[in-house]
Image (spheres, grey):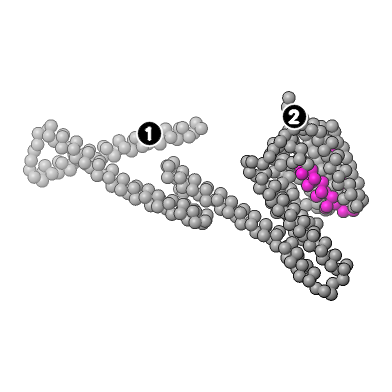
């Protein structure tokens, strides 16, 4: 801060010295020019008139120099102005690759700041456009697969040569793919609602340990089918949150652990109070997630293994929804994972303050 003020002061002093030097040169030039004219025409004016002529001549020379400089700088500013308007027009048409040249080492000027702002805006809009295109591509991809299955098996059902068993099998596939489409649509609507400012949000106090215990029991058919061991440590904890939304978080995390843990594995669920936070840990001895995927697993439609997740019915939206819900509650969600060892999700929520 002090360096900035000192630099501005030095620039101001430098500008004043430069201006005084220019004025001195103009008046000196006027003096010698008028003396040359007197010699040329053979006239010796009175001292007062000579001083007046030097003064007027100095102002004339200074004004001429300033006019020339202003014309030059005006052209520079107008060129820059036209460059910026052209960049804005291109951005309005969807071209966000514009880049206005900025002299980083030059003096601070409103035009420089405006150029930087336009470059920043173009970069951010370009990123948003890329996200929009990726989102449309992902949605189209997710919808196309079940629609293709439904269409293909619906055509097969028209055949009179199908046995009753084959017909029931194809109908079950159509039913499964229809449910998958419905779930995808539901998750998209939920995520869109969560990212808006109008999502219903009703906080209330409730026992988090009871909620987790209920969800684990509700998932019993799934983890019993895979013969998974459940390691449960639920400290009695009260939170202030939207119970329905937080239920979605725990269901997504527990279902993922069950889904990606091989038969005979272990899933651990714990809740405790640590300082000013309520901490929920859901860990498993599953297949794990490679380190290069960890920074992106909360992104919409992101899948570490598309073929595997498709087989298990995932759409890549569950973790994005869970992450958004936790953020809305002022909390954080983290993940640690090692391939072949397992994964642990840690959710931290603020405690109730009286």
* Residue at the spot 80% in from the left edge and 59% down from the top edge: 176
Residue 77: percent from the left, percent from the top?
Answer: 37, 48
What element does badge 2 sit on? loop
Q: Position of residue 276 (x, y in %)?
A: 75, 30
In the rendered structure, the answer to whether residue 144 lies left or right of residue 251 reads left
Residue nearest the observer in this picture, 40 or 187 = 187
- In the picture of the structure, the residue carrying the numbered disc 1 is 13
Establish if 279 lies above or below 120.
above
Q: Are marks 2 and 1 in contact (CB under 8 Å)?
A: no
Q: Is residue 153 magenta?
A: no
Per the image, label 1 sits on a secondary structure element best described as helix
Q: Residues within 10 Å of mark 2 (few under 14, many from 20)?
A: some
Is residue 48 visible to the viewer in this orientation of the structure?
yes
Is residue 315 visible in the rendered structure shown here? no
What range is drawn magenta here?
248-270
Q: Please, is residue 354 above or below residue 111 in the view? A: above
Report if residue 262 lies within the magenta region: yes
- Residue at 85% across, 51% down: 261
Return the residue at label 2.
Answer: 352
Against 266, is 349 above or below?
above
Write the residue at 80% across / 73% down. 159
């Amino acid at each position: 801060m002090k360096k900035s003020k000192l630099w501005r002061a030095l620039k101001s002093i430098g500008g004043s010295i430069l201006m005084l030097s220019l004025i001195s040169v103009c008046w000196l030039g006027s003096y010698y020019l008028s003396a040359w004219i007197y010699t040329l025409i053979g006239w010796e004016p009175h001292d007062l008139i000579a001083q007046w002529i030097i003064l007027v001549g100095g102002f004339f020379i200074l004004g001429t120099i300033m006019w020339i400089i202003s014309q030059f700088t005006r052209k520079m500013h107008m060129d820059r102005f036209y460059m910026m308007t052209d960049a804005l027009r291109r951005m309005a048409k969807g071209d966000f690759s514009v880049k206005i040249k900025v002299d980083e080492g030059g003096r601070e000027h409103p035009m420089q700041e405006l150029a930087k702002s336009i470059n920043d805006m173009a970069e951010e809009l370009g990123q948003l456009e890329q996200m929009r295109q990726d989102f449309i591509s992902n949605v189209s991809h997710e919808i196309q697969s079940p629609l293709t299955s439904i269409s293909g098996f619906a055509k097969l059902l028209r055949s009179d040569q199908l046995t009753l068993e084959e017909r029931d099998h194809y109908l079950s596939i159509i039913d499964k793919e229809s449910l998958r489409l419905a779930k995808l649509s539901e998750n998209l609507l939920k995520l869109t609602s969560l990212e808006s400012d109008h999502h219903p949000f009703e906080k209330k106090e409730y026992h988090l340990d009871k909620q987790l215990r209920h969800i684990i029991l509700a998932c019993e058919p799934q983890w019993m089918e895979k013969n998974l061991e459940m390691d449960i440590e639920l400290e009695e904890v009260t939170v202030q949150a939207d119970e329905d939304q937080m239920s979605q978080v725990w269901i997504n995390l527990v279902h993922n652990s069950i889904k990606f843990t091989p038969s005979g594995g272990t899933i651990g669920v714990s809740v405790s109070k640590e300082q000013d936070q309520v901490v929920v840990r859901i860990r498993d001895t599953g297949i794990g997630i490679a380190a290069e995927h960890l920074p992106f697993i909360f992104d919409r439609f992101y899948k570490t293994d598309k073929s595997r997740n498709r087989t298990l019915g995932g759409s890549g939206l569950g973790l994005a929804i869970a992450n958004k819900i936790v953020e809305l509650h002022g909390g954080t969600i983290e993940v640690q994972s090692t391939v072949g060892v397992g994964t642990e999700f840690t959710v931290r929520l603020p405690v109730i303050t009286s």
